[in-house]
Image (cartoon, helix red, strand yellow):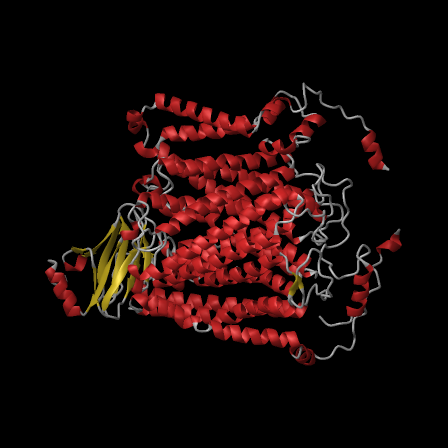
Amino acid sequence: MADTLTPPTDGPEAPTNRPPAMHRLREWLQRRYVRHVLIITVVVGFALLPLCWLILAAMNQSGGPASTVMEDIQQTIFVFTLVSIPITSFVFAVLIYSLFGWKGKGGDAPPNNDNPAISNNITAVITWTVSSSLLAGFLVAWGLIELADITADSYGSQPTTGQLRNADEVVINVTGQQWVWTFEYPQYDKVTTDILYLPKDRPVLFNVTSVDVIHNFWAVELGVKVDANPGAITQTGVTPNKEGIFNVRCAELCGLHHAYMETEIRVMPQDAFDSMMRENGGGSPS
Amino acid sequence: MSTATIYQVEVPQPKQHGKPGGIMRHLNFFTGLIGGVVLALVFGFLMNIQFPAGAQTANFANAAAGPTFWAMMVGWVIGFMGGMGAFVGPIRWLLGRDLTHDDAEFMAGKDQGKFRYWRFTTDHKVVGIQYLIVAMIILGFGGLLAMLIRTELGATWMEVFNPDFYNSLVGTHGIAMVIAMIVIVSGPVGNFIVPLMCGARDMAFPRLNALSIWLLVCAVPPLILSLLVGGIRDGWSVYQPLNAQAGPGMIGYQTTIIVFAVSTALASVNIMTTILTMRAKGMTWSRTPILIYGSFAAAAMGLYAFPFYMYSQILSMTDRLINTSFFDPIEGGSVWLYENLFWLLGHPEVYVILIPSMAVLMELIPVFMRKPLFSYYMAIAGIVGVVGLSGLVWAHHMYMTGWAPQANYPFMLSTEMISIPVGFLVLVVIGTMWRGTFWSRLPMMAVFAVIFNKMIGGVTGIYLSDVPADQYFHGNMFVTAHFHYMLMGAGLFGAMGGIAYYFPKMTGRYLDERTGSIGFWTAFAGFQITFMSMFVAGLQGQPRRVLQFDSMFNISNWISTIGAYTIGIGMLIFLAAIISSWRSGQVASSNPWQAQTLDWQTATPVPLDNFPVLPVVTKLPYDYGVPDPLAPKTLEKEYDEKVGAPS
């Protein structure tokens, strides 16, 4: 019985005189289908390229970035779109070439064709694994650096320490409740407004909380977003660098009138901000 | 031989009491329905006597919490399962009466015609079909709600529903679709196909199998009824403490989830045990078809993910009913605890939906390409990688909650890493397509649709995995569009391809190619219109789950609604194709796709014990175009000519 255990020796013999890798690559690249797939990849890639700017155009429709945080976010989205185009267009190119190049046949029985029995290709597997890992590694690295950058700009979304981190900053206590936002300015005699007034080019610290359910404080064009949690204060910050009227929306379902829980942000010069505070009965900064 | 002597041993047989089946002869879906309704009314009545409406405030934390409704739900579950005969087995055990062979055959639905589909039938093929039908019913219900949602969202001036009902629509649509998508591939494929593909006679635990499907059926009415008693107004994630404000409809949701989680756990254990212990002789781990790996992976993820969901709902329920405060911040609870428990389910669940659907596609691609599966080990590595990482990424749903900002860094890392194993699966698919002329039938065409959608869903997922980008996209329509690309674009369209592929085995007939394709591609076109414009709405800054929006979002929402109606029409056509083909489609042979897996090697309709003789496996079932003692001679000749050719 032992002889049945010996491995079968038939099958093609391993070629001993394989041409060098560069020759094989050149030979591979000269094949008709390879060239076609690569050409389609390039065409699809260039067709998708405008997306990088179209995405930003759509994001800027309501007023454009009004802080460095939002600029960083947009830059991240731009870069991510750019680096995902090559791999997406390669996959699309294979799909397209399969549909229109290699083609299919209908019928009730499988077409009796002579497809090559490729059950593996170690070069392709390694190339794919290495390139997708490099790509993912790049995205992770970019994300981590940008996150650290944004956290430095906005203090992250952290539980409050009760201390100012910047002597110059305006502190605003943001309170969400069903279904309005209120903004309290403790440095201006605790003035309370329902429109968010911000001075241009001055760091702002938001202490965000809620009195009932979870809301999400989203200052759209400033790139600020953090949950307003009942029973906890989350802290975040931003330095608006553009004057204008922007939007606050609630980005967490909070009940009946969630859709209407939005208000305006007015970013104005420092003196206009001061007079606005006085108008609301706040006096001068304490 | 030793096996022969085993069979000669006299085994004491249990005594037959009365007709085979005993009381089970009289129990079916309709007695279950009656039992459920009656017991629900009785329990509700008793609870009302004990705690009349006025007195509820004194005994319960929340007068609107509806202890009466809770009692009715408990009554429904017990009554329905009792009426179905789910407790007959355990009671028999207690009485020391084991099933005789005839009893077991009765339970398996032998010679009962179509009526066995209405019974507590243990045959895995019956259960598989039941799963398919139930999933399609839930899907139809969820789809109807989706149409209503898009009607409301057509434009700023389209105000059809009041905000309360609209929020209920959103929540119920979400949870109904999630349940439907979890079972639509894992259910029919895991129960009908996997045992066949393993070369087994049935699932490992046939009675648990029947229990899992009828628990699923039991979980559906509370979900639908909850629309009548306040609804699920808080999205499918029902975050606390918003959850606590909701009416008794929330109890319907919690009942559904608890029952569904038990059903899923039973189904998972059953599928995993079947795969681990009942694969045919010779089916080693390196000869196991990829679909079995996929089903196993989904079952394993479901098994550890669903308990978190169940706990979160049980704790919510006690918060509501007996004034505990797990999640109530005013009394020291934590809203973040709920979010963590919920998303510990929430993210693995996505892969519970996607992996079986991808596995079905990987199973059918070699058949329609007439080529081996490209890099089988890569496919396994992809599935294993996804399972491994799926449990480590949940908090990417919580980047913006302020829960633990420092944790955003590692969760961003693990989330972006998951694109690598998912990429393996894409490579396997396009590698199998490489240089092959395909057999252009509907299942194969679904592969193109799914890979297209999966790329878009995957790339947009990369934005969402990144914290800075998520700072714009969290809670935004962009997220909605992204997960629809994944769950519907890859999951549901994959399921449609899978249904088309297994239709001949399940029903003995082909799914009508022409009507099916028209429906499929109409739905596909509508899908692109709907969710591409939803991406645009998200980029413009529209939050999720709103009923009213700024007029700047009008155009994208209008287009999206038109697309949604197109999906609806496409799905109806596909449904019509399924129904008409099931009744009077073209009759198919037992192996119409000429596939090599074991499920196609048995007769159609599949006999009660699946295989006359249990098969023995000698190779991986993907060597199309490779010489095989059973393959026609011509293939062998071609191989000889090709064998020197470079790949």
Q: Nearer the viewer, residue B28 or B441?
A: B441
Report x, y in % for residue B152: 35, 50
Residue at point 47%, 49% (across, down): B346
Report x, y in % for residue B324: 36, 35
On screen, residue B183 above or below A36:
above
On screen, residue A22 above or below B592:
below
Report x, y in % for residue B77: 48, 30
On screen, residue A71 above or below B210:
below
Regarding residue B62, the answer to whether it shows in the image is no
Q: Nearer the viewer, residue B331 or B346?
A: B346
Report x, y in % for residue B348: 51, 50
Horizontal side, residue B483 vs residue B204: left or right: left
Residue at point 35%, 38% (across, down): B230
Quadrant of the rendered structure where residue A144 is? bottom left
On screen, residue A149 above or below B322:
below
Regarding residue B573, the answer to whether it shows in the image is yes
